Amino acid sequence: MSEYFKDKVVVVTGGTDGIGKALVESLLRKGAKVSTCARNSDKLYALQTANPSAPLHTMVADVSNENECRRLIEMTVKMFGGIDVLINNAGVSMRALIKEADTSVIKKVMDINFYGTLYCTKYALDSIIARKGTIVGISSIAGYRGLPGRSGYSASKFAVQGFLEAVKTELMYDGVHVMWVCPGFTTSNIRNAALDKTGQSHGETPMDESKMMSSKAVAERIEKAIIKRKRTLVLTFTGKRTVFMQKFFPKLSDKLAYKFFFKDGKLVK
């Protein structure tokens, strides 16, 4: 598997935490040339310092900003000559009931999760088509099943999957591989950074991380799926069960989702 990524140029958005960081570190070990972005300059500096001699390009960028996405892609092509793989990983979650959440929170989640994917994909497309490369979207089980308390997050992931499915079909005979990944609950910073009803970070999570898949394990599965050119990758037994139940037993899925996320009528997860 390691030989596949040798000398390939891979862009990973949101590469300083969780799945993104695990992907950056793993791909560098496998000989890839990696370009990544994040909003936190200190974390990018730490990543660069930890990999001093690696072919790693870092840039401070907010993926909700179209010009910053364009600049990330242009700088990557200028530095490495092109792009073989784009992994749209940067994202933000939310935890708030729709009756309490500001609409600005939903918009912020959509701007980062969906429009960030759109911008980076659009600007990298010519290079990826020329190299018959790969486009990956890190989605979620929330892209198959709307999750209570996460309406904006679910909407953004449904949008990402619909967008990538359309792109995949458009590029069917161009040799481009398009895939979306649904990790399920993963030990990452995305829940700690989840937005509350006013758009501020929660800073804590009610989830039991001991029962979750590690970011490193998720990264390894994503790399294998890229090599095998899979269409979709749904991880964890709970994730696969949720997708199955939603497809064949949607009414029961509604009840099970409510039971999981609510206790005595209050959102607990």
Image (cartoon, helix red, strand yellow):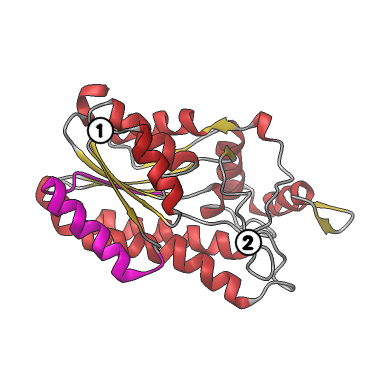
**Residue 207 magenta:** no
Q: Residues within 10 Å of mark 1 (few under 14, many from 20)?
A: some
Q: Is residue 171 visible?
A: no
Residue 188 in the image, given as x and y percentages of width and height? 56, 41
The location of residue 267, given as percent across then percent down, is 79, 56
- Secondary structure beneath label 2: loop
Q: Is residue 78 magenta?
A: yes
Front residue (pair 14, 242): 14
Label 1 close to label 2 by CB (< 8 Å): no
> Which disc is residue 195 wearing?
2
Residue type at tag 2 = Leu
Residue at position x 45%, y 49% in the image = 42
Residue 21, position in %: x, y? 42, 39
Q: CA distance from mark 1 to mark 2?
A: 34 Å
Q: Picture coordinates of residue 72 (x, y %)?
A: 26, 58
Q: Quadrant of residue 66?
A: bottom left
- Image quarter (top left, top right, bottom left or bottom right) of the N terminus: top left
Residue 191, numbered label:
none
As shown in the figure, which amino acid type bears the numbered disc 1? Ala
Residue numbers of the magenta segment: 64-90
* Mark earlier in primary sequence (1, 2): 1
**Residue drawn where x is 20% and y is 23% of the image:** 3
Q: Nearer the viewer, residue 155 or 78?
A: 78
Residue 17 against residue 163 in the figure, above or below: above
Under circle 1, the secondary element is loop
Q: What residue did someone put label 1 on?
A: 54
Q: Quadrant of residue 102?
A: bottom right
Looking at the image, which residue sits at the far right?
264
